[in-house]
Image (cartoon, helix red, strand yellow):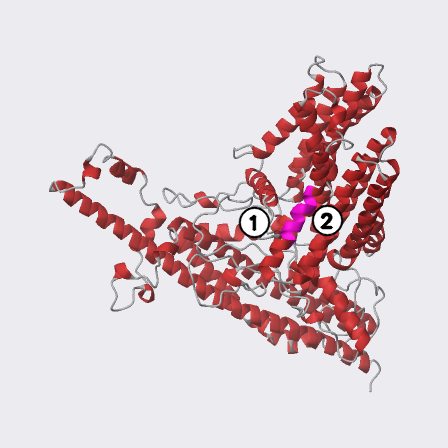
Amino acid sequence: MEPGGIEKAEFENFLDDQLNTVEKFYKEKEDEAGQRLKVLKEQLHEMRNRRTQELNAQKQQAEMEFMHGHHGHGDGAKNGPLGWIDPVRSKIFRPGPNSKNLSKMARTPVMRPREGQDARMDYIRRPPEHEVPYRSAKRKLKLALQEFYRGLELLKSYAILNRTAFRKLNKKYDKAINARPQYRYMTEKVNKSWFVNSDALDGHIKAVEDLYARYFERGNHKIAAGKLRSMARKPRDESGSAFRCGILLGTGAVFGIQGAILGVQLLWDHDAHVREQTSYLLQIYGGYFFMLLLFCMFCINCAIWTRNKINYPFIFEFDTRNNLDWRQLAEFPSLFTFIFGLFLWLNFSSYGSDEVYEYYPVALIFVSALIIFLPLPVLKARSRKWFAYSHWRLLLAGLYPVEFRDFFLGDIYCSLTYAMCNVELFFCVYANAWDNPVQCNSNHSRLLGFLGALPPIWRFLQCLRRYRDTRNIFPHLINGGKYTMSILAAMSLSMYRINNTRGNLAMFITFSTVNAIYTSIWDIFMDFSLLDPNPKKKLNGKPDEKPSKLPVLRQTRALKKTWPYYFIAIVDPILRWAWIFYAIFTHDTQHSTIVSFLVALAEVSRRGMWTLFRVENEHCANVTARKASRDVPLPYPTESPSRSPTISDAGKDGAVLETTGTADAPGTADAQAPAGLPRRRRVAWTFTTILAEAHRQDFEKRKKPIEEVEPQLEEAGGMASDDGSGSDDDDDDDGDRSDAASEADSMEIREARELGDNARQGTRRA
């Protein structure tokens, strides 16, 4: 064999394997796209036919009422004093231009009532109790077409990116071995492959544009194509947001630091009443500060996710048309930082009369609540509505299906116990007009202890809801046991603070120790999935010849550096044991408040790091499962397959569910131990893999029933309402529009990048 022949054969086999993977995936998704397009056409035809029937029925009813009124046989109610309402309403709320356009289209023959049945008795096709209003159906189909178009664009970019990757691989390889002729592999295999030569995707894209123009833009193809393509446009310049964030953060930090210094100085004031008031005011401001700090850390995490191409909008199920870029999102904590710093400085600089000194926190909370709940289309109204609605779902935990945002927000509040306890402190001191505020602290109030245990209670109820929906004991009831220990630890701490006895101290130490061990193991094995049970496993599940250089870490990682994974694996369990200082300084009046603040600061910092890796782990799971988009629920029932080109299996009612596996039957191929391993290693491998994949069952994707008439509350990034009259462009107005979705990484781009990395390694070996 010629020199380097073995390496050359290995490299070509590697390229063949990658080409087959790309070819198989592309062909599968292209076929699914064709099926999905067929279903969307049927849905649009059904919407048109139903709307035409509604308009004809309204017209016939109006003619009959006119004839009855003309002959004097009208209904008494209609000829009574309120009989003028219906004619006026029909004149004001006329059918919109889009409805008139639909009425001019020919009916689809297959959608007519079955032969032998009266059109008015078509109970099989149109059950009255499940009738979908036209506006709701139109809104859903618009979103479905937009999401489908986005999926087609992703699949098209997947094909282009992989063709470019193969060309660059071939070029570098030919240059390394000085091959002649060049690009032989591209010419013989890649250029003849299906994903390079197929034009079906372009046809689907053109068909979607035509459908969107015909049904929603009155035949204007230019406007339709512009709206569909705007979802994939390049990111806008957000220098304005960065400037505003800098101004607000800088100014707020200056005010806040100066105000904190003045407040600390007042703790040594000669007036005992001022010292007492200042100490409690600082505690109230401390709770606000921790919420603000965690919000800022979330924005920093969004920047890190964007930089590392982590598709967090898909994980949180943001509407890709309207979700905020991380720079735009950072304007909120920047604004609140400015307000917080300003009020802190005004309060402790003794600005105003002595009577006002106690009420600056009230003004701060009022202004903050006004900004969040302001019912005006300003200040990113959709995002504020999403934020408020998410808290409503958390407040009623257990009554709603658990989405990612629900359990994520619940875990966030599990680290904000300092702020939760300050709710009791705030209302207690102001309800008693600052008379004897000592009665409101943790040594006297049982309500404060309950509020500290409330976030784990929310999470426990969510775990019960997940068990009810899936009937999987693992991980939901096991996870519920973890939050049970958190509840017991919070309750025992409150009991120990109120009644300082050895028994209460022993109970607090016992529950807190078990809780720290429980949560640390859960973080490392499940939330982070850091321990890889098979260090030789590649992304496609095939064993590598050489063991991994990083056997402790999972193979699929989104962050470019490896040290953060080791850092979080060490720091997270350590910070879980910060509760020890509670047992030491609980009844030391001089130090207990400071210790509580520092322990809360450590927990908030840990939660900020946890947030980064929890979302990163979920993204890696989506990459492995090949998830980059999801099907939008359609308004009308259908038996046809309805899968988009870049998503995985859909659950009932078109909802994509994350709960694809159980402890007994893992839902992915990765949970199956490879053949050839000893029995003990195989059992350990399977068990560790199940633990690493348990986080995928913490939630389910948003699910909307087909019978839904109108959503109870449009969420941030949701669709604007369609009033059915006037211009049909109303529900396309995109307030808070951002192109962060275009920055979010799809599974296709990540695979191409990894393909290039592997190819460079293969070139070096050759």
Dividing the picture into quadrants, the one containing residue 150 is bottom right
**Residue range corresponding to the magenta coloring:** 454-463
Position of residue 295 measured from the top left corner of the image (x, y, whole percent): 70, 40
In this view, which residue lies farthest toward the bottom? 1
Q: Which mark is residue 399?
A: 1
Location of residue 641 in the rendering, given as x and y in whole percent from the top left corner: 48, 68
What secondary structure characterizes most of the magenta part? helix
Residue 234 at what x, y percent from top left?
Answer: 61, 50
Quadrant into which the C terminus falls:
bottom right
Q: Label 2: which residue?
A: 611
**Mark 2 neighbour class, 10 Å CA radius: few under 14, some 14 to 19, many 20 or more:** many
* Residue drawn where x is 12% and y is 40% of the image: 72
Horizontal side, residue 184 vs residue 637: left or right: right
Decide if residue 566 is on the left or right side of residue 146: right
In this rendering, the answer to whether 144 lies above or below 298 is below
Check if residue 374 falls in the magenta segment.
no
The quadrant of the image that shows the N terminus is bottom right
View extreme (left): residue: 71
Crowdedness near tag 1: few (<14), some (14–19) or many (≥20) residues, C-alpha within 10 Å: few
Label 2 element class:
helix
Label annotation for residue 174:
none
Rendering quarter of residue 601: top right
Q: Amino acid at mark 2?
A: Thr
